[in-house]
Image (spheres, rainbow, N blue to C red):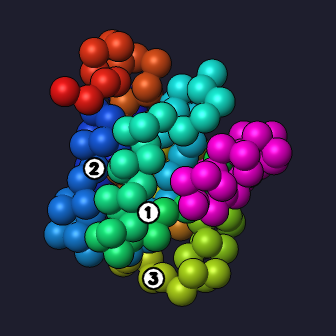
Amino acid sequence: MNSIKADKKFEKFEDVTPDILVNEGVKLLLCDLDNTLRLHSEKEPAEELVKWIEGCHKAGVKVVIISNNGRKKMMQKFCKPIGVPCVWWAHKPFSTKLTEAMDEYHFTTEETVMLGDKYSTDVLAARFAKIRAWKVDHRRNLTPNDQKED
């Protein structure tokens, strides 16, 4: 049995709506990239991701991608068009990059959430950083109909 628990669970990132973020007092949303916001094979941001990021920004939420992916150029190429800063090679579950992001953008632990698909990296890193951990299902496990907007 897994003793590391997420504070909230969602099927996919799109279920984390701007209303939920505002109601929960989230001002900084740290997001894993691979298999949380995109399939590992996706080279460009999907339309639903672009719309979701725009909704977060309109709600006053700063989004920062914190990834263990070590491919700096790919990360920058993916994140720049959606206007989201990215941290690559974050070494989660170590929480260093999470706390550095909070410091850099001047947000408190109470205002910050980590959103990711893995207990062993994303949720654990959030626990070490003393912030809320929200978990989504691994995108690979979603059916194609679940990944498209209605």
Amino acid type assigned to the residue bearing label 3 in the image: Thr
Q: Is residue 140 above or below residue 136?
A: above
Magenta-drawn stretch contains 118: no
The answer to whether residue 72 is magenta is yes
Determine crowd level at label 1: few under 14, some 14-19, many 20+ residues with C-alpha closer than 10 A: many
- Which is more toward the observer, 71 or 8? 71
Residue extending farthest to the bottom is 106
Disc with the residue nearer the chain's start (2 vs 1): 2
Element type where label 2 sits in the image: loop
Q: Quadrant of residue 80?
A: bottom right
The quadrant of the rendering that contains the N terminus is top left
Left or right of residue 83: residue 74: right
Residue at image mark 2: 16
What is the magenta range?
A: 69-93
Q: Which mark is residue 139?
A: none
- Asked whether, in this view, residue 100 is left or right of residue 64, the answer is right
Q: Residue at x 38, y 38 (%)?
A: 48
In the image shown, does 141 or 46 lie closer to the viewer? Answer: 46
Q: CA distance from mark 3 to mark 1?
A: 12 Å
Amino acid carrying mark 2 in the image: Val
The percent position of residue 46, horizontal first and vertical second, equals 48, 34
Marks 3, 1: nearer the viewer: 1
Is 120 left or right of 117, judged from the image as shown? right
Other residues around mark 2 within 10 Å, as few (<14) / some (14–19) / many (≥20): some
The residue that appears at 19% across and 27% down in the rendered structure is 150
Q: Which mark is residue 29?
A: 1
How packed mark 3 is, by other alpha carbons closer than 10 Å (few <14, some 14-19, many 20 or more), is some
Q: Pointer 3: what residue? A: 108
* Residue 15 in the image, given as x and y percentages of width and height: 25, 43
